[in-house]
Image (tube, grey):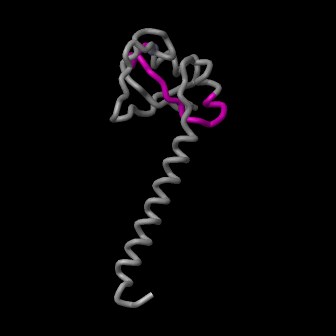
Amino acid sequence: MPINGIDEEVKLILDQIQDNLLHRAEELLDSSIAQVNSTKEAEKALENKKIVFGAWCATAGCEEELKTKFAIKTLNSPLEQADLKTMKCFACSEKANKWFHFGKSY
Ligand SMILES: [Zn+2]
């Protein structure tokens, strides 16, 4: 490789490395998340060490119930929210208000 082209070449390689890392991180994240429709599915996903993703009513009462009954805690809500339409909360079957990530509470 000619020395005068090295800047371009290095930049290209760095870009490729960055793309690869991002891609692998995204894959890892995707494979670590399980979308659930019930507390039963959520418990199972958590047993398998996954992060739970579900449509949630986002009420304090439901959060408390998840914590005490199922040892499930709220993590965060994605900034980009897919349309919930008429979806129900995976835990209490009330109207869902938000997509949310959940984890195991210890
Ligand atoms: Zn609920």
Percent across and percent down for residue 43 are 62, 24
Question: Looking at the image, which residue is at 39% across and 12% down?
Answer: 86
Left or right, 33 with reference to 80: right
Question: Looking at the image, which residue is at 53% across and 53% down?
Answer: 24
Q: Quadrant of residue 56?
A: top left
Percent across and percent down for residue 92 are 49, 11
Q: Is residue 50 above or below residue 82?
A: below
Q: Is residue 19 above or below residue 81?
A: below
In the picture, the quarter occupied by the N terminus is bottom left
Q: Quadrant of residue 3?
A: bottom left
Nearer to us in this view, 26 or 61: 26
Percent across and percent down for residue 97 are 36, 18
The boundaries of the magenta stretch are 45-61
Left or right, 44 with reference to 72: right
Nearer to us in this view, 76 or 7: 7
Residue 48 falls within the magenta-colored stretch? yes
Count of numbered badges drawn on the protein: 0
Question: Looking at the image, which residue is at 53% across and 28% down?
Answer: 35
